[in-house]
Structure formats: structure tokens, C-alpha cells
Amino acid sequence: MASAAILTIGNELVSGDTPNTNGSWLAARLESLGFSVHLIAALPDDIGRVSSFVRAQAAEVDTMVVTGGLGGTPDDLTREALAAAFEVPQVEEVEVAAALRARFPSDPEYAARWAQLPEGSRPLENPLGGAPGFMIQNVYVLPGLPSEMEAMFGLVEPELGRAEPITSWRRIYRTTESRIVRVLQAMGERHPGVLVGSYPSFSPDGSQVEVVVKSNDPAALATATAWIEAELDEVTRGS
């Protein structure tokens, strides 16, 4: 199964001023393409921290997706951080810079700074905004604004869809985790290639647990869910 990591960049994310919706959205989309997401991280606009993180984590996964920090204000440092991560200089992408100057004639040099990409990058079109994204080695760098990020991801999604998508079965039971823990443990032993998770919630009406089973192997998923559904129905009967 292909692996992925997600890094979202922005002081507003780590301070809690802005919810990290990009991370959750990307995780769901990557899973639908067959990627096992190993981590979702948020870092401040700090060249040293971002470059160190990317250098270490990009080597551990098949694909990394980075969002944020591509604008033109002083805290937009992602281009510099990725250049540092891969130990390359920033160079102006001439065609991209020319297009930006033409598109933003009121302040062409401000816009052209967005074309200073790490050497060896492939620019990525931004269909809804100004600053382009880019890809370098196995890292896709997208804007932080959710609408722009989602639109740009849509353009690169076809080249990522190589593996079988991860699909899931889920069901909510009116029970507690303590009552079904033995079934969950047995599931891991009987079906080691299938992921199972349990997510409890509590309300005045009582306790309930959502059980989720995931796999990119349709046959394995069908076999595992048939087994666990029967077992859980037996354990929770009458609860």
C-alpha cells in the first residue's frame, strides 16, 4: 500500500486561530486514492522547522503533501523552506514569472516573487488564485487557502491515483468499548491486513461505539466485515 504524509504550515494553525481543515480533507482524499496516511502535522512559518521536518519525513513515505505559506507576505516562507530541505537554490521559473507579471500588472514584481521556486521543481497551476504550487521529488506543495488547495489537488489527483482505493465499512452499536474489546482484538488476529478502529461517544441516551473497518483489498474487507458484524451482533444483542 502506498504511503503518504501531510504537512500543513501556518502560525494560525498551531496557535489554534484557524482549524486545520486542509489536513482532514487531504487525508480523506488520499485514502480514496489508496494511500495509507502515516501522519498529519502542523508547523509554524519557520524555515528551519519546516525544512528539517520535510527532509526527514519525505524519505519515509511515497508521497508528501504540504499546504500553506505560498503568498507574498513575510510569513510565507514555504518556498524557502523546501529549497533548504532539498539543499537547492531558489530560481525564477521564467515562464511562470512572465505569466504572473502579465496577470498582475498593477504590481508585477510582487507577483513574480511567487515564481522563485526550489531548483528542480515542477510548477503547479493555481486555477483559483495567484501563487503557483510546485512539486519537488515526492513532495507536492499546495496553497493554504482551502478553495485553492482543493482545486490544485484536483489537477494533480490523476497522477496520484495508482493504487487500489481504501474503502471502509462502518456501523454504530449501542454499547461500550469494554463489551466489544475481545472482538476487536480477535479481529486483528484473524484479519491482520485489515484496519479496525472503535470510536466511543456518550450522551444522555447512553453509550455508543462506531466501529470502522478499512482495507484496499475488497475481498479481504468483505471477509473481515462479515466476520466482525456477526460477532458484534452476538456480543451486543440485548444491549
Image: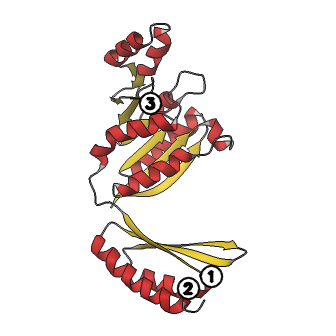
Relative vertical location of residue 219 with respect to residue 88 in this rendering, above or below:
below
Q: Residue at x 47, y 10 (%)?
A: 109
- CA gap between label 2 and label 3 equals 49 Å
Res. 54 in view = yes
Is 159 positioned to the left or the right of 55 in the image?
Answer: left
Q: Residue at x 50, y 55 (%)?
A: 39
* Residue at the far top in the pictured view: 106
The amino acid pointed to by label 1 is Thr
The amino acid pointed to by label 2 is Ile
51 or 116: nearer the viewer: 116
The amino acid pointed to by label 3 is Ala
Res 167 label: none
Q: Quadrant of the C terminus?
A: bottom right
Is 237 positioned to the left or the right of 128 in the image?
Answer: right
Q: Quadrant of the N terminus?
A: bottom left
Q: CB of mark 2 within 8 Å of CB of mark 1?
A: yes
Res 83 label: 3
Q: Which residue is mark 1?
A: 176
Local crowd size for mark 2, using a 10 Å CA cut-off: few (<14), some (14–19), many (≥20): some
Relative vertical location of residue 161 with respect to residue 189 in this rendering, above or below:
above
- CA gap between label 3 and label 1 equals 49 Å
Question: At which x and y percent is residue 135?
Answer: 36, 35
Local crowd size for mark 3, using a 10 Å CA cut-off: few (<14), some (14–19), many (≥20): many
Question: At which x and y percent is residue 201?
Answer: 64, 71
Q: Which residue is mark 2?
A: 180
Local crowd size for mark 1, using a 10 Å CA cut-off: few (<14), some (14–19), many (≥20): many
